[in-house]
Image: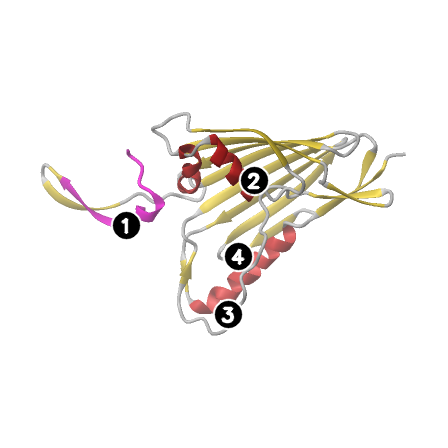
Amino acid sequence: MGFIGFDNSDRNVLMVTEDGGKLIRTPVYSAKENFQDRKTKVNFAEDGTADINIKTAYGNAQFEDNFGMLLIEPTEQRKKINQNTDIPGAELGSFKYEQANKALPIMTEEINLKSNQLLSKGGEKAFLTLNLVNRMESVPAKMDTRKTYFAVPFSYQDQDEIDFVLPKSYAIEFLPKDISITSEFGTYTAKFVAKGNTITYTRTQTMEAKKFPPEKYNDLVDFYKKIYQADKQKAILAKAP
C-alpha cells in the first residue's frame, strides 16, 4: 500500500474524494529512486580459489523486478540464483532475501559463492575480469529500417563496487584506465583503483526514461556497444618477485 508501481507511475488518474473527483498525476520515480546498489567482496586464497560475498539492495522499480524472489521457496530461489549467475565456476553457498520494512519497496539480497575459475592464467601472468556481477552480455542488432518509436521503460541507476583481495603471490601489473560514456540515453562510468594487494572496481550506469524516434535506435545500439566493451575490462597480474 502507498506505492505506485512503475507501470502506473507518471499517469493521469481520477482520484475520488469526499469533495468529488479530481484529476491528478501519479508519482514519477527518478533513476536514483529505482536503484540497484551492490557491494561485492572477493577474497582470493593462494591457490586462486575465491570466496565471493555479494550484497544488493533493490528499490522501487528494481524492487518490483526482483520481488518474486521473496515469494518462492528456498529450493526455487537456489535454482534461480544458479540460472542467473554468470560467474565462472561458481558454487553457491548461503543466500538470503529480505524486505526489512514491509511499508517500503526495498529488498535486500545476500549471496555467498566460491569459485576457482576467476583467474585465467597464461605463463607467469593471470587475467582477472573486473566486472564480475553486472555485465552487459549482448548488444541488440542495428535496424536501418525501424519505423516505430522506442523508449527506456523506466529511469534507473545501477551502482556496483567490487573489492578484490588478491593472493600475496601476485602483483598488479596492469589496470585499465577509467571509462566515462555519456549519451542522451544515459551515462556510464567505470573506475579502477589499486591499493596494496586490493583492486577496487566501481561501475555506475544511469538510464533515463524517455521516448525516442526510430532514427535514434542505432545510436542506442552504439551506446550499448560501448558499455558491452567497457564491461569486459581485465586486470593483469604477475607473479610477485
Looking at the image, the residue that sits furthest to the right is 241
In the rendered view, tell whether residue 46 sits above or below residue 217.
above
Residue at the disc numbered 2: 82
In the rendered view, tell whether residue 91 sits above or below residue 123.
above
Label 3 residue SS = loop
Q: Earlier in the sequence, mark 4 or mark 1?
A: 1
Looking at the image, the residue that sits furthest to the bottom is 145
Q: Which residue lies at the image location 68% right of the left edge and 41% below the top edge?
A: 192
User: Which of the two discs, 4 and 2, sits closer to the camera?
Assistant: 2
Q: Quadrant of residue 40?
A: top right
Q: Are marks 3 and 2 in contact (CB under 8 Å)?
A: no
Label 4 to label 2: alpha-carbon separation = 34 Å
Q: Which residue lies at the image location 33% right of the left edge and 48% below the top edge?
A: 7
Amino acid on which the number 1 mark rests in the picture:
Arg
Reply yes or no: does residue 4 show up in magenta.
yes
Residue at the disc numbered 3: 143
Q: Earlier in the sequence, mark 1 or mark 3?
A: 1
Q: Nearer the viewer, residue 167 or 92?
A: 92
Quadrant in which the C terminus appears: top right
Q: Which residue lies at the image location 57% right of the left edge and 62% below the top edge?
A: 222
Amino acid on which the number 3 mark rests in the picture:
Met
Label 4 to label 1: alpha-carbon separation = 26 Å
Residue at the disc numbered 1: 11
Q: Quadrant of residue 100?
A: top left
Amino acid on which the number 2 mark rests in the picture:
Asn
Label 2 to label 1: alpha-carbon separation = 37 Å
Q: Are marks 4 and 3 in contact (CB under 8 Å)?
A: no
Q: Quadrant of residue 1?
A: top left
Kindly identify which numbered label has been placed on residue 183.
4
Q: Which residues are magenta?
A: 1-16
User: Which of the two discs, 2 and 1, sits closer to the camera?
Assistant: 2
